[in-house]
Image (cartoon, grey):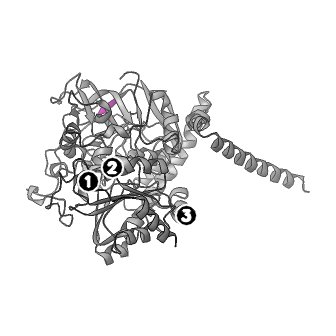
């Protein structure tokens, strides 16, 4: 089968790989019908995540048709079209029992901090991902959801990560009616975070980024007030002033390790790798939120550590909530939101290509070329 | 000054969005979603510890490196790209340290870089010349942003030229 093949930071190719096999009674193998490139894939692509091995296939946002199931899988069968949450979750452990499917304790040998994630380095379990024609799906008796007949596969594939992550960013923020919400980052997750903030009753939604075409998109899609941080001076001062001097009720970091806006963090985090990427979005979030406010972090950072103003967290009495999205917990509600017309995820898809186009799509997404917001791969076997 | 100007510009350019005009506004508002309350639900902790019905353990065909913080191996594991070569040896050493040790992560990042060299050598020994232009997807830049490619190529030529000239000067000196 054809699969994406990581070769070096900023270098990927497409090669023939062996077909995935059933390796556990609860496994399935799916024929991939849609597979997105996620903004967090770019952290891998840029070499920011430790234990990213040459030859791995990335891809944690995919849906597909079940081709084969293990002996213990009964809830999905061959021929079902399923969306596959990016979390590999057993559904039984201490954490899964609490709905913390991103923190499953039975799927990641490489680290205890996070559960298994498809195609996301050995720090997240060492599983090959879905940027391929076929993929192995562990715990297939728990994770995948059969896609409703009426649902567009383009919407379904976005329910595997980006929409639930944006939704959980807003949920974790504990938004109360009328709250001012500031979202740092106008990538796909930031766009969905801004959109979902309204579902929880936000009174004002502000998005900060520096990529003009993405700000223009989220301005109408969310909708939101949008600002280019290069044009507003110090973003923290700007937010304080535009919120009557107190700061925002809620700040959401939807950027993660690939941020920009501070030379020190760029050198230490992105060039020298002495931090887990660039942490200026967290700085801005902590310093922009009002005292007693909430900072919600869904941007992905590496595990080493980052310089953050923890003293201000203490002094301001800030609550920080963060996690990988528990996709399966959100999927039923999000399907309902799509069915009722409250969410239209597929509008963020700007580019599509075949598996063979993977190197160009990664480069285009990474370099923000041609108005790229969300690229999706549609394999020839789809 | 820039902040003040931006505030003034924003007041002129942005109208406040009426929340009630946004489709779905408030449908999931939940006053009981208090972020200061722990997400953890202790009521379900009947015994504490790892007391769940453990899934049947997978029997991997390849070497699996495991965090020393794990009490037991998780029942299901990824079997992609097992450790091998020098990078594999570095990874094995890294896994002697816990996830809280910088040595663990920095050794893994170093192993990743060694692994890149190993990958190139493996290609070459198999008679395959890595196609960096194609693998970096530069054709996308050429299609959508030619000036970027030209500028970067020019910078590369200047740097290489400067290095070559420097070496030539050094070699020409007695």
Looking at the image, tell me whether mark 3 or mark 2 is earlier in sequence order: 2
Q: Is residue B23 above or below residue B134?
A: below
Does the CB distance between marks 1 and 2 fall below 8 Å?
Answer: yes
Q: Secondary structure at mark 2?
A: loop
Residue located beneath label 1 in the image: A198
Where is residue A279? Give x, y as percent. 44, 62
Q: Is residue A31 visible?
A: yes
Inspect the magenta stretch and tell me whether residue A381 lies in it: no
Let me know if marks 3 and 2 both belong to one chain.
yes
Chain under disc 3: A
Chain under disc 2: A
Q: Tell me the CA gap for discs 3 and 1.
A: 34 Å
Residue located beneath label 3 in the image: A263
Q: Secondary structure at mark 1?
A: helix
Residue located beneath label 2 in the image: A222
Of the 4 image quadrants, the one containing the C terminus of chain B is bottom right
Q: Quadrant of residue B137?
A: top right
Where is residue A74? Give x, y as percent. 15, 29
Q: Is residue B71 visible?
A: no
Magenta span: A135-141
Instruction: Rate crowding at label 2 as few (under 14), some (14 to 19) or many (20 or more) other CA atoms within 10 Å.
Output: many
Q: Tell me the CA gap for discs 3 and 2.
A: 30 Å
Looking at the image, tell me whether mark 1 or mark 2 is earlier in sequence order: 1
Q: Secondary structure at mark 3?
A: helix
Could you tell whether B52 is left or right of A6 in the image?
Answer: left
Which residue is outermost to the bottom?
Answer: A315
Q: Quadrant of residue A18?
A: top left
């Amino acid at each position: 089968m054809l699969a994406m093949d990581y070769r070096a930071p900023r270098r990927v190719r497409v090669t023939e790989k062996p077909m995935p096999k059933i390796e556990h009674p609860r496994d399935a193998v799916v024929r991939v019908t849609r597979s997105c490139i996620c903004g967090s894939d770019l952290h891998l692509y840029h070499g920011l995540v430790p234990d990213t091995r040459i030859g791995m296939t990335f891809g944690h946002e995919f849906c597909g048709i079940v081709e084969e199931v293990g002996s213990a899988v009964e809830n999905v069968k061959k021929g079902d079209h399923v969306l596959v949450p990016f979390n590999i979750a057993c559904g039984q452990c201490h954490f899964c029992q609490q709905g913390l499917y991103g923190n499953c304790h039975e799927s990641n040998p490489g680290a205890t901090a996070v559960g298994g994630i498809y195609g996301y380095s050995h720090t997240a379990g060492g599983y090959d991902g879905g940027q391929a024609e076929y993929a192995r799906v562990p715990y297939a008796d728990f994770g995948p959801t059969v896609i409703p007949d009426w649902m567009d596969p383009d919407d379904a594939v976005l329910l595997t990560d980006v929409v639930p992550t944006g939704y959980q960013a807003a949920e974790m923020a504990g938004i109360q009616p009328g709250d001012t919400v500031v979202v740092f980052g106008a990538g796909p997750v930031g766009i969905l975070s801004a959109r979902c903030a309204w579902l929880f009753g936000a009174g004002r939604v502000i998005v900060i980024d520096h990529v003009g075409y993405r700000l223009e998109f989220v301005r109408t899609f969310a909708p939101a007030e949008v600002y280019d941080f290069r044009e507003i001076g110090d973003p923290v001062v700007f937010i304080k002033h535009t919120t009557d001097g107190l700061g925002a009720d809620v700040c959401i970091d939807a950027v993660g390790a690939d941020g920009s806006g501070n030379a020190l963090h760029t050198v230490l985090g992105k060039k020298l790798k002495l931090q887990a990427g660039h942490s200026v979005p967290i700085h801005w979030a902590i310093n922009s939120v009002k005292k007693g406010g909430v900072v919600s972090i869904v941007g992905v950072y590496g595990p080493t550590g980052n310089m953050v103003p923890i003293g201000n967290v203490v002094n301001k009495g800030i609550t920080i909530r963060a996690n990988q999205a528990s996709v399966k917990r959100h999927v039923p509600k999000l399907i309902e939101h799509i069915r009722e017309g409250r969410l239209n995820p597929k509008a963020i898809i700007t580019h599509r290509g075949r598996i063979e186009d993977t190197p160009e799509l990664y480069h285009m997404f990474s370099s923000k070329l041609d108005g790229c917001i969300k690229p999706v791969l549609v394999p020839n076997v789809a | 000054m820039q902040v003040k100007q931006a505030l003034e510009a924003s007041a002129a350019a942005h109208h406040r969005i009426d929340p009630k005009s946004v489709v779905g506004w408030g449908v999931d508002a939940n006053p009981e979603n208090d972020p200061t309350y722990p997400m953890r639900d202790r009521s379900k902790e009947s015994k504490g510890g790892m007391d769940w019905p453990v899934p049947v353990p997978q029997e991997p065909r390849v070497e699996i490196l495991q965090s020393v913080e794990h009490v037991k191996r998780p029942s299901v594991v990824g079997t992609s790209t097992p450790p091998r070569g020098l990078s594999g040896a570095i990874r094995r050493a890294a896994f002697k340290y816990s996830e809280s040790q910088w040595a663990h992560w920095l050794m893994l990042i170093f192993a990743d870089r060694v692994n890149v060299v190993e990958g190139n050598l493996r290609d070459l020994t198999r008679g395959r010349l890595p196609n960096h232009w194609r693998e970096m997807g530069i054709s996308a830049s050429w299609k959508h942003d030619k000036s970027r490619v030209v500028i970067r190529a020019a910078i590369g030529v200047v740097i290489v030229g400067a290095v070559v000239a420097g070496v030539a000067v050094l070699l020409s000196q007695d």
